[in-house]
Image (tube, grey):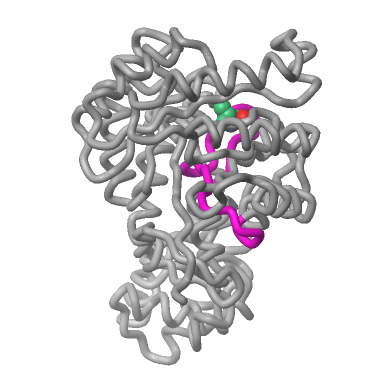
Amino acid sequence: MGDRKVIVFDTTLRDGEQTPGVNFDKETKYKIANKLVSLGVDVIEAGFPAASNGDFEAVKYVAENLDGVTVAGLSRCVKSDIDRTYEALKNAKKSRIHLFIATSDIHLKYKLKISRDEALKMAVDSVKYALGKFDEIQFSAEDASRTDWDFLVKVFNEVIDAGAKIINIPDTVGYAVPKEFGRLVEYVKDNIHDRENVTISVHCHNDLGMAVVNSLSAVESGADQVEVTVCGIGERAGNAALEEVIMAINTRKDYFNVIHGINTKEIYSTCKLVSEMAGIELQPNKAIVGFNAFRHTAGIHQHGVINNKATYEIMKPEDIGITTDHISMGKLSGRNAFELKLKNMGFNLSRDEVNIAFKRFKDVADNKKVVDDEDIREIVEDVILNSKS
Ligand code: KIV
Ligand code: ZN
């Protein structure tokens, strides 16, 4: 039997847009959506059509113009939202409505002010109403990780019986811990109706910094779909970062034994595009795509990677689409790195010249965090000039 495929549902354009201060207009959504198609995601959640006229137009535009991917729209479990989502998605090549209602007692009591039975009825009625209007129906039990497990399964089973083919388990407030979340996925998997024909999805938030690890734990427990955003942007502390989930699966293929449709070489440029469009600068130590993610500073590390990159790099930067130099020159850099740098910059110095240049480099580095190529060029040209005079 071949490896199981994990479906990648990207919600950069919906939950990602819930990042405070982010607003994608329709052209921007279309631009990002095209990039997501090149990246190879399976489903793009383009927005929440009933939220505003602008978002309705944006989702409609993306749905009408995008090929090769399923386009999803978020909808509350109310007829007016479903109708609006239908209008936005009706010309998509493949459409998916993403229905959601909260199921945890705290949300039912204080937010929706309805009983469990009322929420269940709204969920089932909405799935029935959506049937036939979309290619696929996905149902999310908002705040699933804080919902009573038996009630959660009851809701899932009734929406499955009504026609939903994808059920999503959101850790809406990033409350879950990995083992427990994995157990929840297993519990749902073991207790839902029609398991063979139903996709189990997870949607993790990052409030405790565990969105990625919870998503991976869910994959390990048999989840079929992960909901992610590029660079992990999203409401509050954000969502599970697509690039981190995917590169963990790839780098530890021996452990996860699953496949996906992502072309990892597109990761870096996609992250650059999204961070630029969102106006969010990535933290330098951001996993996978941060400025420092493949930079080596300590002399011992630099020596290692010069001899064999695998000493300190568990992924190849080229696999993510990064092609820049990885040696960060500073006071901790060793002679090996310095000599390699000179070679890469096209300098061919005598032994004596290298000795003088290296000493000068160390003096400069003592007063500067990073010594860039221009600093090194200046040092070397000065050394060459003096050795000739
Ligand atoms: O976090 C959440 O619960 C959501 C749902 C709408 C899936 O974004
Ligand atoms: Zn969310």
Give 50 or 347, whichever is nearer the viewer: 50
**In the displayed image of the protein, which residue is found farthest to the bottom?**
351
Magenta run includes residue 220: yes
Q: Which residues are magenta?
A: 219-241
Give 27 or 260, whichever is nearer the viewer: 260
Where is residue 91 shown, x and y percent of the image?
Answer: 22, 26
Residue occupying image coordinates x 51% and y 43%: 228
Quadrant for the C terminus, please: bottom left
Residue occupying image coordinates x 63% and y 72%: 298
Q: Quadrant of residue 122?
A: top right
Residue occupying image coordinates x 63% and y 39%: 169
> Relative to residue 256, is residue 48 drawn left or right?
left
Magenta run includes residue 3: no
Q: Quadrant of ligand 2?
A: top right
Give 224 or 61, whichever is nearer the viewer: 224
Residue occupying image coordinates x 76% and y 43%: 176
Is residue 374 shown to the viewer in this render? no
State the count of labels.
0
Where is residue 19 shown, x and y percent of the image?
Answer: 54, 26
Give 183 or 206, whichever is nearer the viewer: 183
Please tell me whether the stretch drawn in magenta is mainly helix, strand or loop. Answer: loop
Where is residue 248 shown, x and y percent of the image?
Answer: 56, 63
Is residue 124 shown to the viewer in this render? yes
Where is residue 235 shown, x and y percent of the image?
Answer: 59, 28
